[in-house]
Structure formats: structure tokens, C-alpha cells
Image (tube, rainbow, N blue to C red):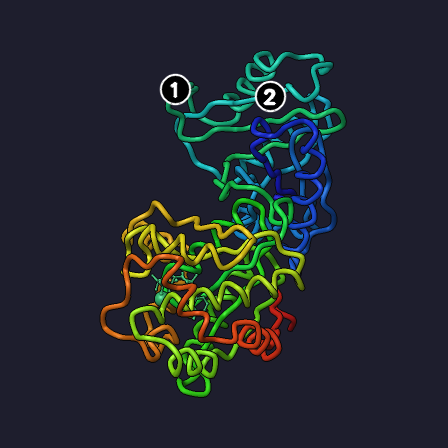
Amino acid sequence: MTALVVHYHEIALKARNRPLFVNQLVLNLGRATAGLPVRRIRKLPGRVVLELSEEGSAGAAADRVRQVFGVANCSPAYRSSLTLDALQETAEKVLTGQSFQTFRVTARRGAYKAFPLTSQQLNEVLGSFVLQRYSARVDLKNPELTLFVEILPREAFLYLEKVPGVGGLPVGVGGRVIALVSGGIDSPVAAYRMMRRGCLVTFVHFHGAPFLDRRTQEKTREIVKLLTRFQYASRLYMVPFGEVQQEVVLNTRGPYRVLLYRRLMARIAEHLASLEGAGALVTGESLGQVASQTLENLTVIEEAVTLPILRPLVGMDKAEISEQARGIETYEISIQPDQDCCTLFVPRHPATRATIEEIGRAELTLDIDRLVKMGVERAELEVFAFPEAP
Ligand code: ATP
Ligand code: MG
């Protein structure tokens, strides 16, 4: 096959947003297939078509394309001109090497109503052509093979399968967000879900250096590398947080520390967000999962910043989150043992229902502005690309 027909969920689109959506999708399809023999990418009515310059490359291209957010499904196809002879010849090419007992033809001329045959007439003409060449019969309900024919204004595409895509919205149409990623199971899934809604994600990781080893940093890099498959270019800020935490420990009581860390993280992330032009923070918190994630504590964390904190996992349980983590292949990395900086200098029983007043009093003993500045200034930016440069 020498083309890949890409369908998106058009119905969900408001007319005004459609060009934006399709242009971003085309851009992303180009980036996702970098290094593959794609000659050009065309916007056609209701679909996008990738023209391939090598016969055997459709499978590899489909593997990349089905992962692109916004894709409903994609089909390795042959292109044909609109004469009946050409359509039959192309049908023969598409069917080469196929063995089947039952089949049907599903033709659509919806994108080119001026085509002289109706969809049903086309089904019949091409159906009898197949009947003449193969000892197979028509089964409309449950065919072993379906020959799809899409009639467009200047050309047609013929194919046998629709490879399901991941859906969602093309990365880039939803603006930029800052995702706090810990190296654990949850936060990579949260970042993924935001990408799937069209957001470009910049990552921030806080690590316990100089008091803890570099394992969470290594894990986070591997996770960001995996997630970059979905947005093609990523930025990751590594923030050394150990000394900030040390100051918190010297000045405050144990039960509040986790929340004080979280509020400092949120503030530092908010500063990075303004550098990045990002409109929200994203965390992997889910309600009630651990002591720090009660409604009260989420409220206290929220109060430290003005940007919204988005929590795409808030209503999911651990099993659902873990399943998604496996799906995006971050799970295996996340479960490797590490030393999370939030376990640094914290008591066994952190406060579960802190109030803003209590935390505010605890923060009076800290020079918040200086601590935030320390984090922002020491943050180191790393960049990632997909496909990786050879
Ligand atoms: P995760 O599986 O993402 O680590 P968790 O269930 O361990 O989450 P917490 O440790 O309470 O939950 O962290 C809640 C959220 O806070 C994380 O999902 C992440 O967004 C953010 N976070 C926690 N620790 C860090 C860190 N070291 N660096 C960046 N973000 C962090
Ligand atoms: Mg964690």
C-alpha cells in the first residue's frame, strides 16, 4: 500500500476550531512519522492522507500514526483515479494475496456527491467484479473481508482495514501546562491524559540532591523520554530540592512538612510556568489515595498558587491508574525502587486535615520567597525529542 488514510472524530469539532485542529494534526503526523518514507501529507475533505514513497512502509507508518492524538483510525490504502476501470484495477491490487470465503464492499461517495454512481451502485459494481475473480460470496453482516472504497473529489482510496487510533485532540491545540512528575506511577499518567486533551506538557521534577541519590532523576528522564513519543519535543526542569527541604525541617514541626513541601513545589512550578507561558499546573493526585491527598490538603496546596492545579486522576483508583501506566509503558520504570524526596525528613503520620491557617502560621517561620527563588534559579532544563536524533 502506498498511502495511509487518517480519519479523525470530525463530529466533535466546532466549525470554527476545525482548521486549527486539522492543521495541528497534520503537523503532528509529520513529526510522528519523521524518518519514515512519507512523501507528503495532504488535507482532504474530512480526512488526512499520507503519501508513502515505499510500498512496504504502510505498516510502520500506521504504527506511528495510530498513536497520534486526534486520530480516530487509519488505513493503509491504495490510491486510484475515479474511472471504473481504475477502481477495479486498484481493487485487484488491494486484494492481491488475500484469501477469504466471504466479503463485502463498503463504498462511500459522501465527500464527492457528484460521482456518477451512488454508494450502493458502487458496492454492487465492485462486488460483482470481486465475485468474478474470487470464489467467495457476499456476506453483508459478518464478512471475513471488507473492501472499503472512499470516493473523494479527485481520487479514491481503497483499503481493507481500519486500525484504531488513540483518539483525543492533537497535542498543541490545548495550550501549555506544567506537569509535576515524581518518578512514581501516577504523575506520568496525569501528564499523558493532559497531552491526550491537546496540551503541550513541560515537566518539572524535584529531587532530593544533595541528600538522596540520583535514581528518581534517572527514572524521570526515562519516563519523559517515553512520554515524548506523544508530543515530539519535551522540556524537563530538574529542581534540586534537598536544601529547601532542609530549611523547612529546621524551622517547622513534622506533621506539616509534606504539605509545606507541596506548597513550595507548586510555587516553584508556578514560576517556571510563567517562563514557559503555561496556563496550569498538573499533578497525579487522586482523592483519598494517601494521607496528603484529602480534600482538605488538596485545598491547602491549591491556596499557595494562583494558577489552577489540574488533577486528571482525581476520581480514579490505583488499579485504573496502574492499568493506564502499563498501557503507556511507564509502569515498569515507575515501580523501580527510588528515594522520593517527599520521604525526606517527614514523620510517619503527616497531617491529614491541615487548615490554611495552620499552614500559614508554619510558613511565617520560613522565608518563602527566598526558598522559591532558590528552586527556580537552580532548576536545570533538559530537552527531549522524538524520534531521537540519530
Ligand atoms: P506519584 O505516583 O505521581 O508519585 P503519589 O501517589 O506518590 O504520586 P504523592 O507522593 O502524594 O502521590 O504526590 C502527589 C503528586 O505531587 C504527584 O503525582 C506529583 O504530581 C507531585 N509530586 C510529588 N513528588 C514530586 C516530585 N518529587 N517532583 C515532582 N512532582 C512531585
Ligand atoms: Mg510518589
Q: Quick check: which quadrant has ligand 2? A: bottom left
SS under mark 2 = strand
Disc 1: residue Cβ within 8 A of ligand 1's nearest atom = no
Q: Residues within 10 Å of mark 2 (few under 14, many from 20)?
A: some
Label ID, residue 141: 1
Number of marks: 2
The residue type indicated by label 2 comes to: Arg
In the image shown, does 40 or 147 lie closer to the viewer?
Answer: 40
Residue 69 location (% of width, % of height): 55, 46
At x 47%, y 73%, the residue is 206
Quadrant of the frame with the C terminus: bottom right
Which badge, 2 or 1, is on the more N-terminal residue?
Answer: 2
**Residue 336 seen in render:** yes
Residue lying at 42% horizontally and 60% vertically, measured from the top left: 187
User: Which of the pair 179/333 is nearer the observer?
Assistant: 179
| Secondary structure at numbered mark 1 | loop
Q: Quadrant of the N terminus?
A: top right
**Quadrant in which residue 332 is drawn:** bottom left
Q: Are marks 2 and 1 in contact (CB under 8 Å)?
A: no
Dot 1: few (<14), some (14–19), or many (≥20) neighbours within 10 Å?
A: few
Residue extending furthest toward the left: 348
258 vs 65, left or right, is: left
Question: Quick one: 300 or 50, which is closer to the camera?
Answer: 300
- Residue 271, by quadrant, is bottom right
- 243 relative position to 46: left or right: left
The residue that disc 2 covers is 108
Q: Position of residue 118 (x, y in %)?
A: 63, 12
Residue 111 vertical placement versus 311 (above, below): above
The residue positioned 65% from the left and 60% from the top of the image is 274
Residue at image x 62%, y 66%? 385
Mark 2 CB within 8 Å of ligand 1 = no
